[in-house]
Image (spheres, rainbow, N blue to C red):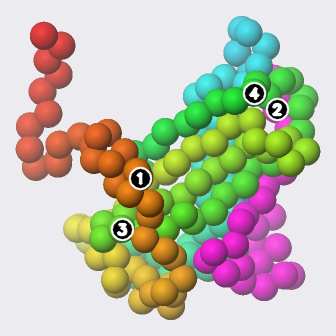
Amino acid sequence: MNVIWRTLLVMLRARVRRRRQGRLPATAVGRVRLTTLPTDIDLLRHMNNGRYLSLFDLGRWDLMIRTDLVEILRERGWYPVVGSETVTFRKSLNLWQRFEVQTRWIGHDDRALYLEHRAVVRGEVYATAIIRARMLRRAGGTVPMDELLAALELPQELPEVPSWMHEWAEHVALPSTRRPAPSDWD
């Protein structure tokens, strides 16, 4: 709820842009212009590291609406969940600084879609995030990738992800929800 008003505003703007400019291809880069607000900064007077992921969500909403993914998901009773994410920081975003969240689909493997988000100021990358997301059915279960790509009508457009992303996903994965995952620090 911490960025609910921004989320609603981004969703509204994305719908207007979709109507006026047409559907974005799935391989396009989505762009959302933002400003670092007082609620985004921490005691060190720059954007809090946790806020980046919340604001990168805005980029995903924009891209999902403008590529019609939201409509496809709604019609089929599917919804996306983030399984893994990693953020790398390069420069700090300061109070009232304007920046752009750039979002693009990187590709897919047999189980998930991969996205990249960037926080960009005047063409320069300040932070980047890699997101691994899966589609689930509201009725239960996971949507197979071939079914998802067929629904999007782009079986060839999203490339297979680079091998390092497979390794990353494997190394950060937690056990399945059907297996135990005890918290044992010893």
The disc labelled 3 sits on which kind of residue?
Asp
The percent position of residue 66, horizontal first and vertical second, equals: 69, 74
Query: In the rendered structure, which disc, 1 or 3, sits on the residue that comes first in sequence?
Result: 3
- Given residues 74 and 112, the one toward you in this image is 112
The residue at which mark 3 appears reads as 109
Residue position marked by numbered label 4 in the rendering? 91
Mark toward the viewer: 2 or 1? 1
Quadrant housing the N terminus? top right
Please tell me whether residue 53 is drawn above or below residue 140 in the rendered image.
above
Q: Residues within 10 Å of mark 4 (few under 14, many from 20)?
A: some
Residue for point 77% across, 19% down: 46
What residue does disc 1 label?
A: 165
> In the rendered image of this protein, does residue 94 appear above or below residue 9?
above
Residue occupied by mark 2: 36
Sequence order check, earlier mark of 4 and 3: 4
Query: At 50% across and 91% down in the image, what residue appears?
Result: 153
How far separated are the C-alphas under marks 1 and 3?
Answer: 10 Å
Q: Secondary structure under badge 3?
A: loop
